[in-house]
Image (cartoon, rainbow, N blue to C red):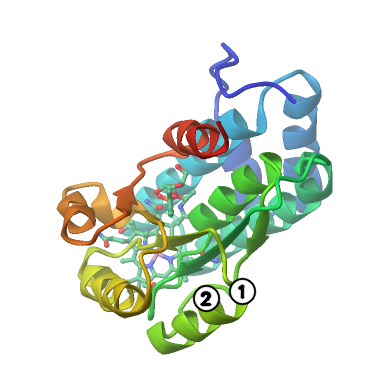
Amino acid sequence: MQAFSDKTNPDHSRYLKLILEGDRMAASGHIKDLAAQGVSIQNIYEHIIKTALYRVGELWESNQVTVAEEHIATSVTESIMNELFYDIVSRQRQARKVVLGCVETEFHQVGVKMVADIFEMKGWDTYFPGSNVPANEMIRYIDKQSPDLVALSVSIYSHIPLLEKTLRLIRQKSDLPVIIGGQAFRHGGQEVAERYPNTRYIANLKELEDYIDQQQS
Ligand code: B12
């Protein structure tokens, strides 16, 4: 598997067209072709899939695509990520666990699924109870799994107080390391991490890879 820093700068426009058309087969083939050409999964996630989905959001906001087209673009993307999974997980396991989730009322889950895949590529075991996980249920699940790390995702800025609710509940019990991320922080709010010990904001998959490497060194 290529490192994140492969020099290619792939263009997202073909992928965008295919997912808006709902052409799952062609979109899947396109991503597999890129991977076969040596474009890293991290690069595909960050520069093709994320860029295309951000563009879908802009087109939806300006009424140039319908809600149904936006939904199908996302569901085709999730199906392709699921297809890639078996090939990207590292066979060298690290005996480390991460529990990941989207905070209460947060439905955007593609970004945190990418985060989970990067951990799997690094040999970590990932547990993703999904989007919109009630804070109390997240705490119960963390208790049950006893992970080495928790990763929480927030896309909507007004959900940051719900992230803080989960962080407070985690900190009442332990000083388990927590990483937070998601586009809720695109225009600020990262200082939330400073209010909770052992909590760190990570902006993208490159920073995430560096962070995981530090944990393993
Ligand atoms: C698909 C989508 C949906 C789908 C999500 C389905 C799903 N299965 O995930 C559905 C239909 C549910 C949805 C609903 C809504 N959506 Co929406 N949605 C999108 C869209 C088009 C794509 C989201 C996406 O997957 N992006 C791609 C991923 C890969 O990017 P990402 O999440 O930023 O992740 C990256 C980083 O942030 C980071 N990261 C993410 N999480 C984490 C966590 C950790 C720990 C770390 C380290 C890193 C990390 O890693 C990723 C790689 O770099 C976006 C457009 C956009 N700009 O993203 C709008 C968008 C996010 N949605 C928006 C809105 C307004 C809504 C609704 C309120 C619409 C409505 N009126 O109902 C609801 C809210 C639902 C809710 N309560 O959460 C707005 C948000 C605006 C804002 N400022 O808050 C956006 C930006 C669209 C827009 N342009 O207006 N949406």
Point 74% across, 55% down: residue:
82
State yes or no: discs 2 and 1 in contact (Cβ < 8 Å). Answer: yes
Q: Would you place residue 149 above or below residue 165 in this image?
A: above
Residue 21, position as x, y percentages in the image: 64, 51
Q: Is residue 97 left or right of residue 143?
A: right
Local crowd at mark 1 within 10 Å, few (<14), some, or many (≥20)? few
Point 56% across, 73% down: residue:
130
Q: Would you place residue 12 above or below residue 6 in this image?
A: below
Image quarter in which the N terminus is found: top right
Local crowd at mark 2 within 10 Å, few (<14), some, or many (≥20)? many
Image quarter in which the C terminus is found: top right
Does residue 47 appear in the picture of this structure? yes
Give the structural element (helix, strand or loop) at label 1. helix
Q: Would you place residue 55 above or below residue 159 in this image?
A: above
Residue 128, position as x, y percentages in the image: 60, 68
172 or 35: nearer the eye? 172
| Residue at the disc numbered 1 | 145
Q: Which quadrant contains ligand 1?
A: bottom left
Disc number placed over residue 142 in the picture, else none: 2
Q: Is residue 134 left or right of residue 14?
A: left
Q: Is residue 172 left or right of residue 79?
A: left
Please name the amino acid that badge 2 sits on.
Ile
Please name the amino acid that badge 1 sits on.
Gln
Point 25% across, 58% down: residue:
197
